[in-house]
Every structure is written in C-alpha cells, then in structure tokens.
Image (cartoon, rainbow, N blue to C red):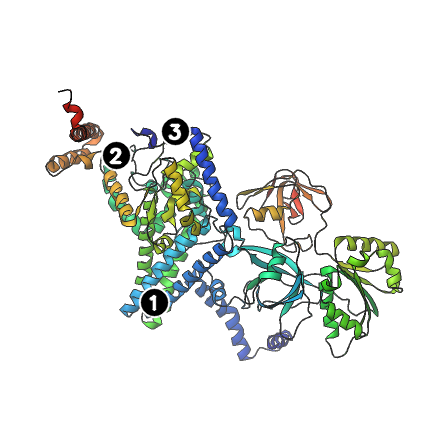
Amino acid sequence: MTSITNKDVNPVAHLSPEDIEQIGLELDAIRQDVIEQRGERDAKYIRRVVKVQRNLELGSRAILLGSALPPLWVLGTAGLSVAKILENMEIGHNVMHGQWDWMRDPKIHSSAWEWDNASTSDGWKHSHNELHHTYTNIVGKDNDLGFGIMRVDEDQRWYPLYLAQPAWNFINACFFEYGIAAYDLELGRNLKLPKDRRSPGFAERAKATVKKIRKQATKDYVVNPLIALPFGSALPALAANFTANLVRNVWSHSVIMCGHFPEGVETFELNKIPENETRGEWYLRQMLGSANISGSKAMHIMTGNLSHQIEHHLFPDLPSSRYAEIAPRVKALFAKYDLNYHEAPLPQQVGSAWHKVVRLSLPNHWLETTNRSNLVDQTKLLYAMTTKGPKMRRLAQRRLDQMARKQAEAKAAQDAPATQPVVEAVPA
Amino acid sequence: MGRMTSTAMSGAGRPASTGGGLRRTLREKVAPKVRDFADAAVTPLSLDDVLDHFHPLRGGSELRGRVVRVTPETPRSATVLIKPGRGWTGHVPGQFVRLGVDVDGVRLWRSYSLTHGPRPDGLISITVKLVPGGAVSTHLVRRVKPGTLVHLGTAEGEFVMPDPMPAKLLLVTAGSGITPVIGMLRNLFHKAEKPDVDIVLIHSALARAEVIFGREIRGYAEAGLIRLVELHTDSRGRLDVAELDQLVPDLDERPTYACGPVGLLDSLETHHAERGLELFVERFRPVLLAEPGEGGTVTFTETGTDVEVQGDSTILDASEAAGVLMPSGCRMGICMSCVLPLKEGTVRDLRNGELTHAVPGETHPDGVTVQTCVTSAAGPCTFTH
C-alpha cells in the first residue's frame, strides 16, 4: 500500500470539506443513538460473557488436572484456549476501552481491569487507546502498523533485513503477548537510548511489565502444573497452558493483522494530516484505515467484535455488542459517499495481510515483476540487492520500477483493444 | 460466638494449648500462604474474585444482598426485604443503609432507612416511596424482582434511640420520614415486655391512603403503646410548628426525634432552638441552598480524565455521569465516603456557597479534602484520583 496522498487515484478526492464534515455529523448521530439505547440488555450481555468465560476457564483448568489422559488434554486445552481468547478479546480489550464504564460497576471498569496477558493494562491502554486509536494508520506514528518492526508501506525504504520479515512476523504471532508488552514499552527505541534519555517512567513501566510477565508465567507454567502434579498431569498441564497461550497469541495476532493490514486499507502521511484535524477528517481516516471480517456470530465474539474493526475504530468506546447492529448504517454511509467498505471473510483477510507482509519484505515491484521465465534473473537481482550495498540497491530498484512500468503499459495496451475495438475501426 | 470465647481466653494470658497453637499457626502462617498460592493460580483475578463468582453473599466478599420479597405498602411505596451477605455487621433501628442497584444497566446508589430492628431471620428491610422521576425509587417499588442481587454498605447514622430511654418522647415524621421511626417502634414493641416509655407520634402525610405503615401505627395507638396524631395535609394543610404546643401540651418534657422534608425539619430546628428544646433530626437530602456559580472543568490526575461540571451540579454527579468511578456514600454531605483531595483550584459548597481553595505550594501538599457530593467546581480544579 502507498500512503493515500501518494496514490495516483486518491480515494477521497471526490469529497468536499463539507461532505467530510457531513459524514462526521451522520456518524455522531449513529453514536448518539447507541448511547441513548444502551442499558440493561448491554449490561446483561457483558456480565454473561464474563460469567461464561470464568466458568470455561475454571472448568478447563479442572479438566486439565486429568490431562495425562489425551482426550482430557485436548478438551481442557481447547477450553482454556477459548477462555483466554474471550478474556483478551471480547472482555479485556473492550473493557479497557471504557466500553462498559457507563455501568459504573467497579468490577467491569477500564480503570480497574487487568487482563490475562503479558502486557500491563496501563501500558496497553496508553499505546493502544491513546496512540493507535488517535494516530490510526499514520506511517511512523502508529506503531500498530507493523508494530515498529516491519516494513508495511512502499514508502518505507527497503533493506535486506526485511527479507526476514515473514519469519519475524510468524514468531511475533506465536509470542504475540510478549511482542505487545515490548511494544507498549517502546522497548526497541528506549533500549537504544542512554538511560537518562529514555522516556520518563520507562524504568518503572519496565519493572511493572516484568512483574506482570512473571506472575502470568508463574500461573501458567508453575502453579497450575503443580496443582496437577498429584494427578500425574504436571507436564501435560504445562504443555496445555503453553498451547493455549500459543493459540490465543496466533489468533489475536491474526485478527489484529486483519484490522489494518489487508491490501486496500489506506495509510496516511504524518505531514499531510492537517494540524487541527477535524472530527470529520478523523472519522474519515478511521473509515479508510480499517478492514472488517465477515462471518458468523461466534466468529465476531471470538474476535472481540474486532471483526467490526471499522465500527470499532469509529466508536471505540461503544459496547462491542452494538457494532453488529450499527454496521448496516455505517455501510450505507460508505455507499452514500462512494467509499470502500473493506470487508471479507477471515481466511481471505489473513491471506491478504500475509501477502502484503511477504510482498513488502521484498523490494518494491519485485514480486509483481517475477514470473516463471525470469525467476533466475530476478533471484540474481535480489541477491545482488541483498549483498552489494546501497548503490547497487538503488540501481536495481530503478530497474524494477522500470519493469513494473513496462508491464503496466503492456497490460493497458492489451486491455484497450478488447474494450474499444469499434472506435478504432471507424476512422480506418 | 465460639471465636469470641477463644479470643477472650488467650487474652486472659492462659498458655495456649497444643490445639490452639496449631490452629493459630494454621490461621497466621499457613492460611496466607495458601491464599498467595491460590491467588497465583488465578492471576490476574484473585481468589476472592473466584469465590465471589460462585458465592456472591459469602463473608469477606464485597457486601451484597439478595432481594427476598417486595411488598407494597401504599399505592406508591413498597418494602424491600433483603438477605444481606455474611459481611453484614448489624444495625441499630433508626440507622440507614446505602444501597446500590443496577437501573437500566447503571449502578446507582441511594441511602434508605432500615425499617426493622435486628430480625431473628437476619433479613433487613427498607421501605421506598416513589419519587416522581426518581430512577432508583421507581426501580425498587415497581420493577425489582426477588432474587436480584443488590450492593450494600454497612449501617450508618446517628439517628437512634437514646440509651437509656427517657420517660417521654416526641416523634415528628412526615411522608417517608416514618421509615427510620418505624424501625425504632418495631424494635421497642416486638419484645414480650413492653418498654415503659410515653411516646407521642405526630405523623403527617398527604392522605389517609398514603400513610406508609398506617395500619401498623394505628394498631400501636389502639393497643395504647403510643399516642398517635395523624395529620392529612390534603384536608388540613401542612403541620405548623406553632401547633405543637396545642397537639402536645407537655412538649417541653419530651426530647424530639424528627424526620421528614427539609422545610419541616428547618422550622422545627428554629422552633426548638428558640425554646431551648432537645431535637434530633434525620435528613434524607442535603440542603443545597447556595446560588449556583459558574462551574468549571475538573481534572482527575490519576485517571487522566477531564469532566465539565455545571455550577448547579455536584462534582460527584457530573463525574459519575461522565463515566468516572467515584467513591461515594450518603450523597448528602454526612458520611465523608466521597472525599477526594483537591490539589489546585476552587470548589463551591452547594449547601452554603462557601468556597474552598487549593493552591500548590501554599495549601497542604496532599491537597485539601473536599466532599464531592455537596460541592461543585468554581473554575478549573484538579483532584488526585
């Protein structure tokens, strides 16, 4: 993807400033409707989810006491994986967004909730609620774009190191909770700086995160296996906890990749964002910078309703249970203003996001200009770009750009006669 | 009971027996370890969260109660009978309890007088009168179902019968002001041996049908336990304190206990002060008399939230409406549960218009404590919360 302002066809060029403000007003109206309606039904919903989650987690952990028996291991591990996913996605993420603060229940409140994850709720609320939701998809400002460790945009210069990006992304998926913890701390950036120049409170936050990680690991890998020890299930229980964390990590990583990574989701340039971005402009950025996942009700709940990423980004503090309800109205608004409501089933969105990770791990245009007949040459070119320094990279990149241009021209020429044969025939 | 005895014995300096020593080791050394282990097994929850999940009314839990029955008293009032959790520490008749209910999904807290003395079945009761437009009273009188969980505070309040009892008493109540008094009367009269005290109860209500506990207080009067003066304001107008001498000729000999609308209590206070008579009152709502000021933005440093507070609304109400979790209690400026430290800025006490300032470097470094339930912002102010 290319930042929206660097594109040949700007997808919002047809909107006047008045249109954009009108979109803002219409979205505000949808928001107000939900706020006026929310009440007992919503409260019942979140309490039920919490109850089901706790029953499932405690039940699964009880089953895992007998996890020396393979069927119980499978059952307990599956239950624990689902419980952890529910806790992180539909409960933790949404509670920490303040979606349920209006209930004034101190037990289900953004200021009090701590989640079953390596990152501390305080750290996560800062990096996610304040940074990601404010600076959504602004390259260089929103660390959710590639989590600060990947090349996610053509405009980012390519280095050979990025070749490892698919592997890196896979490892990040498996240990996602630690990745989030590190990224909440801006660990990479802070560790590079001398101690006295690190962001204020870094040492304190790092300490809190280490403590949280220790508590989480002690629970999953020491205490619960110990409880299973008398039943001869210590090792299977440990494996079950590890597997459940892995499943939760890969699942949440996939869902989150789907939110902003699929091909066709727009990114933005920091210096093109107006200094006093209006509410309408902010809304528009959320509309274009998010992608939905279509699917069943169970799928929506398991993604914490992040499958309604567009609705979530427009209204991050509305109860998640209401996103499905307002989605048709939001979709109609997209249609009315001729904007692309990005929506596809889960496998397709995950595939698209991974395709982009792979494509951008390679130099611009490498993947699209490579075919079976030139594979050897292209590989040689890539090898040279990887091993022969910046000058070679620049030259080779120019060649790739040229090839891509020619390819595009050839394609256009091929398409043109097919669509306009009659026009050509008449003057002859 | 058993626990009290054993504490008393060890307090008397008797050498602890082997059994007692073991029990103490268990309680003091082993139990905390077991708890730490259990907490470690369920983090980020705690053992308490898990126990509450299965048994919300257990001891040691945040105090809650379960609605047992709702009985209509008049067309516009009802008594709610509640089984409190094990953490309930009992009460004295006349005291009130803070009650938190979820009304349309939102937790709201109100204070209600307890309308029974301590009951043998351990239940507590409150009697709620419908307040027009009142979210909580409507919910409790019209909608709440047996089995509903409610949140409770412990019993509070100083409005209780003196001990020992004086020979003569005057009780003045109006409307739902009867609720703390009925608790006192029930407690006195349920005993086999009726107390030797001469009680006059002046109760005024809109009409005969609107008298909460009407049948019961008339019954006490018929049995000769009290002298009842029942006034119906629809036919005769409100009670005028000047009438008291005529209604109660030996007024000077009776300490007065009063509960009812602000107007009645205020005029009673003036009347009794002039005559030098003893008076104890229970107010249900704060006296918010001050002219509202400008209001302002309140900033909470810990949660990092800003709340716009209008000059006529309390910081507590406005912040709760904005989704901030606030400590709260009686909501009438008495119990000090809602106090927060003001670091900087000015607040206005809505009862008397008095301004309180906090200036960093001049006032106390921890801030100036402010009752958020009776104060509004007077310009921008910052709280540690």
Count of marks, rendered view: 3
Residue B366 in view: no
What residue does disc 3 label?
A: A272
C-alpha gap between disc 2 and disc 3: 22 Å
Q: Is residue B279 above or below residue A179?
A: below
Categorize mark 1 by other alpha carbons within 10 Å: few (<14), some (14-19), many (20+).
many
Residue B217, image quadrant: bottom right
Going 55% across and 66% down the picture, which residue do you hit? Answer: B60
Mark nearer the viewer, 1 or 3: 3
What residue does disc 1 label?
A: A64
For this rendering, which residue is in front, A118 or A267?
A: A267
Q: Chain of mark 2?
A: A
Categorize mark 3 by other alpha carbons within 10 Å: few (<14), some (14-19), many (20+).
few
- Which of the image's four quarters has the N terminus of chain A? top left
Task: Decide if residue A377 is on the left or right side of residue A232.
Answer: left
Categorize mark 2 by other alpha carbons within 10 Å: few (<14), some (14-19), many (20+).
many
Q: Which of the two discs, 2 and 1, labels the residue nearer the N terminus?
A: 1
Residue B144: percent from the left, percent from the top? 57, 62
Residue type (three-letter) at the residue carrying disc 3 = Lys
Q: Is residue B255 above or below residue A166?
A: below
Going 61% across and 57% down the picture, which residue do you hit? Answer: B136
What residue does disc 2 label?
A: A158
Going 33% across and 57% down the picture, which residue do you hit? Answer: A245
Mark nearer the viewer, 2 or 3: 3
Residue B285: percent from the left, percent from the top? 70, 53
